[in-house]
Image: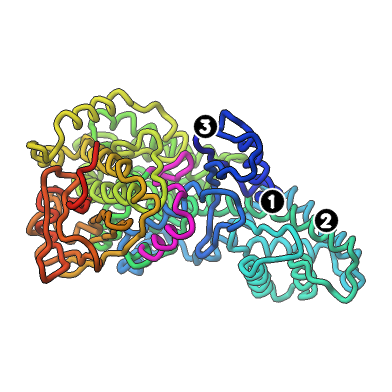
Amino acid sequence: MTGLPTDHIDGRRHPEGYLRRLQERLAGDPAAGGTNGNSKATPFYVVVEKILAENEPLPDDWPVAGTTGYDFLNRVNGLFVNGKNMRQLDRIYHHFSDLKTPFKDLVYEKKKQVMSNLLAVEMYSLGRDLSLLAEQDRYARELPRSFLAKALIETVACLPIYRTYIRGSQIGDFERECITGAIAEAEKRNPRLDRECFEFLRQALLLQSGPVVLTEQREARLNFIMRWQQVTGPIMAKGFEDSLLYVFNRLVSLNEVGGAPNIPGVSPAELHKYGVQRQKRWPNALNATTTHDTKRSEDVRARISVLSEMPSEWEARLARWHSLNQAHRTSIMGRPVPTPNEEILLYQTLLGAWPLENSEVEGFRQRLQDYMIKAIREAMVHTKWNVPNVPHEEAMARFISSILQPSDQNDFLRDFLEFVPRIAFYGALNGLSQALIKITFPGIPDFYQGSELWDLRLVDPDNRGPVDFARRITLLEDLKKHVPGAGNDVSGLLNHWQDGKVKLHVIARALCFRRSRSDLFTHGEYVPVSVAGKWKDHVFAFARRLQDRWAVIVAPRLISALTQPGQFPIGDIWENTSILLPKGAPGKWRSLFEPGIEYSRSQISRALNLSELLRNFPLGLLESATEGRSQG
């Protein structure tokens, strides 16, 4: 073994202790490269599946290289969302879906729903234990058990993170802030509940010593906290991750594990800040864009995000499709199926996952039906896994079958098929930039099987199917034989972008370069690169530097404003837009995507014009030309 990812780390009673025991065991295992108990050995490469909330740090004392990559995934994913249009998307969504509940309240309600049914036994047990702690406290023994249990449930519903990691009397500032904030929010939502219940809960969770707290009482409280911490994670996972992400459907490309569907995207400046911090603290964490648990694959998200660039047209299409499909709806108990909120999820999923090959369309209908049944069960609004609403689910399946039935009378399908190629094209450009950033950003690039070409799969089990590796091998061998740029025009890759070969080209060239310059990408500094000119907001650029070795990465974003569908953002389209090389950067560069092509900046300016830099190919990966040529 060369590395080990650990799943569900938050389910451990003592995650840090588990990870230390794991490292000790691996250190003595020759099969894992261990050294038979040598305590000074370099820690084995371990990454943890830890979902981090906004501004939540990964514990510094864990003996790991970082996370499995959901924090990276969501930040890079947000780069391709136009935050300037989110208010308009808010208005469109709430008007169409008739969903009035604010996002924060939805999270609160979903977590309470999970505690009242799926994890009711666990919460009952914790409530009983809390009341036993109160009975041992002379100032809290009169508090009603039901009130204490209510305070506990309300506090968990307001906790903004998956769990805390308290294991002794020392409590970190971040954990203290999360607990006190959750209790304050719970008190605010429940003004009629006895404040003394919340006060006792605060003392118990923060191990605060009251007027008279004996040693055995403190130990009992710590034991309660250790159990409580193991339960808050599953509540967040089931309530937020597995339910709310199928309920709040404003722009579902943001509805991802570890994500925040209510954010307005991620700006280049925010991603630069994250890159600098990541290189300093967790340079060997995984960079993931698709995993076995993502709600949709990387290129599905990349497509759906394009809707944030054209909200007015999205609104018009929504209204038209809703009207055209009126006849296909079924009324179940006085409620239309699909409901508007389910319908907007369905249309976004159609746009995101519609196959590029006509031969795959027939099988896609069944995949979509299976996906939507899973989605509405997870939402737990009109049907559930444990109590399926069969009439509602059957009506959903019929609706999908009807609207995708080819016929001269199907005006919806005709209109949809006119619109989806535009979304697919701009989404593909997003996907190329996303792949390049993943490989060159601080961290270790991670590829889920099948994502080497366009990956248009949905949540499991849709993403667990067989992968045509033979086709991928054939395409890769062809790329090696006919290297674009080495006497071969890259236009062939662009003209046939639908086959995914252009994505494989980006991945192969970037990975070969990374392998030949491993020190640069493992230890090199992350340097933000400024962009100037008319289209400066449509480019994300950065450099990696290690002594005199340099690489510069240029990744376009939000491209629908620059080009017509099918027109790649290359050449004069960029007009006067340029990247401004950092101080100390060399003057001569060579392209990795077009071997044999070199660029030079002027003697009096540090600028490289994108009209020249992206003359033939829509992405830029440059190495300083003073070095020897990279291999691969």
Q: What residue type is labelled 1?
A: Gln
Disc 1 on helix, strand or loop? helix
Q: What residue type is labelled 3?
A: Met
The CA distance from mark 1 to mark 2 is: 16 Å
In the depicted structure, whether residue 446 falls above or below residue 560 = above
Disc 3 on helix, strand or loop? loop
**Residue 19, x across and y down, in percent:** 64, 45
Give the residue at mark 1.
Answer: 230
Which comes sooner in the sequence, label 1 or label 2? Answer: 2
Which disc number belongs to residue 128? 2
Is residue 415 at least partly visible in the picture? no
Which disc number belongs to residue 545? none
In the depicted structure, whether residue 291 falls above or below residue 550 = above
Give the residue at mark 3.
Answer: 1
Q: Residue drawn 38% across and 43% down?
A: 297
Residue 198: say if magenta.
no
How many neighbours does mark 3 have within 10 angstroms: few (below 14), some (14-19), or many (20 or more)? Answer: few
- Is 606 on the left or on the right of 159, as rendered? left
What segment is highlighted magenta in the picture? Answer: 272-297
Which comes sooner in the sequence, label 1 or label 3? Answer: 3
How many neighbours does mark 2 have within 10 angstroms: few (below 14), some (14-19), or many (20 or more)? Answer: some
